[in-house]
Amino acid sequence: MGQHLSTERDSPRTSWVKSFWSFFQTKTRPNASAPSSEQASLHSRQSQEPDAPEALVDRTKNQATESVDEPAGGVDDPSHVDSDGDSDDSDDSDDEERFCKVLSALDQQQLPMLAATLFRQLHPEIPDDETQPSVDEPKYGSSNLVFPLTFNNGTRWALRIPIDGHPGAWEEQSSSGLASQVYTMQLIKRETTIPVPEIIDHSSTTDNILKCPYIVMSWIEGVQLCDLWFSHRTNGVSPEINRQRNSRALQEVASAMFQLGKFTSKTSGQLLPGSVGDHPKVGPTRSLDMAAMFSRWRNDNEEDESPVYAHLPVNSNVKEHYLTMLDRNPRADVCSKGADLFLRQLINWITEPNGMEPFVLHHPDFNFQNIIVSEEGELKGIIDWDGVQFEPRSIGNETLPSWLTRDWDALMYRWTEEMENGQEPEGVWEDSPQTLACYRRVYCDAMAQLVREDRPNNPVDLCQPSLITTNLSIAVNASHCRDHIMQKVFLEIWAAGHPDWANAHEDYTQYNVYDFPEDDAEINAIEKSEDTQGEEELDDGNHEEKGVGGGDEDVDEAVVEAEAEAEDEEDEEGEEGEEGIPRPPIYFKLVDMLGEERMPDELMVTLKRSFEALLVKGGL
């Protein structure tokens, strides 16, 4: 089986976060530990995106790519099949509708003619009547359309066309992005042993015989790692053999990704054709603007699934690059503003390594659907380089793969105890937090060995803290995941800085940071009160306004009373919990304090010290 026809599965976030679809692919069911919608409405402070259109939510590919697949996809994961491998006619119809403008512009009769011409140029000894390829039905990824091509001698190619590859949508930045991808893949193939597809031909404009931009590349035989990863549950492989195969794959992937460290830059951006030696030519990039896509859906109330891109300039400032999408899409209400300020502060506390150029080439969708392996876990290829660019080292080539960091995002992570007992999930298989931690250790150990051998004088560890840094980057770029990630990070920060508290609460990952009523009767009573009184104006003289939702709306009386009771209880307990152990402040009160600019200096110092401890610990 080739990489392009493999069964799709949910992606965990790309690399964290390379594409809009990467974050929606079958990952929309919240984790059980996340607050319910009823709880969220009670607290009313948690800023959440409204439910996205089903068509957006279900667009999944398997990433991890974070991801969530060719989420942003490409030739590398174009398949669109359901879990049992059979084509879904309704899905095919939806895909044809999504790609209708490209299909209308494309001259499909020229596909075999173009392929035959290219094949004859490479194999002039083969008679012309044996150079005509068979062209399979197109396979649909999230952002690319792929035509599999097969020749009589067994050679297989893939021809990829981007979803916006038609007149009216294809622009200069699109063209430069495709040219950069081709040039970068050719450079990687020439300068490293990373197994990337060979580029056969490409056109970065619509001025060609197909009438659409395209890339023709070789087909890498093997299976997607996402299809091998859970073989102990899906194919009857013993858990020990499965672990050995997965560990082998992780070690070989680490070796491949480490080689990207050869390509560094003083700035962010994409590599431009014509770069020479140690002085790469770097240009601006474009990135999917997920917040803008949500905003369009909310304002237009239409299921427009066409991508919205943000054009990002070259930047030499690492922190500014990190925060680009946060700066583009600020949130105004007090709680959301506070959460965004908290995120911004954490990123400013991240320390980049000294003695190295600040930016390094990195895979744009570092997920296991883009890793091609043998049945034994031997690395055969790394695909889907669409959008490859220079990233800060703290989220660069030495970071953890996105499928190993899923458990830090409650919105995407779907593991349940039943999966460990072999019960097939409704969506996709997941590893337990303990299993993910073990695989993270395998990958970090492999990367640490490579670092010691290659740069003994600067053995800075970028892999272990990347569990935190990559999730913070996802929180910046994916507003719908932001609050879930930040709540998780907040608890881990507190635990790292207060080991006595963490030891006393071994299940602290389930700790209630929401300050919601936990009794069903209390929840129902408050909901009923909200229903009957929600439209009534509250007396400002009797009720303190809490700044809910960022507007001037008064807070429901029942909610005020519930919060007052919680505050009274907190006052009684003070800042210390059981046995005098400091307990974490309520998360939403923390971000409210930030949003209202009343954060105590002592608490900020505590958080900074605890965050630094977490980066050292790595959260593994």
Image: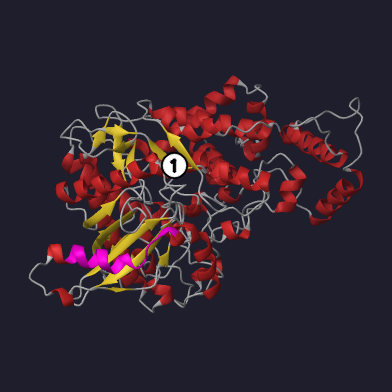
Task: Identify the residue shown where x is 25% and y is 60%.
Answer: 217
Magenta-tinted stretch: 105-119
Dividing the picture into quadrants, the one containing residue 595 is top right
Question: Relative to the observer, which residue lies in front, 73 or 514?
Answer: 73
Could one spot residue 220 in this view of the protein?
A: no
Q: According to the image, label 1 marks what residue? A: 287
Rendered position, 357 above or below 251: above
Rendered position, 429 above or below 529: below
234 magenta-colored: no
Rendered position, 84 above or below 368: below
Q: Position of residue 415 (x, y in %)?
A: 53, 62
Near mark 1 (Cα within 10 A), the count class, few <14, some 14-19 or many ≥20, is some
Rendered position, 446 above or below 617: below
Task: Identify the residue shown where x is 22% and y is 68%.
Answer: 116
Task: Identify the residue shown where x is 56% and y is 61%.
Answer: 58
Q: Is residue 414 left or right of residue 251?
A: right
Could one spot residue 360 in this view of the protein?
A: yes
Q: Is residue 135 left or right of residue 56?
A: left
Dominant SS type (magenta): helix
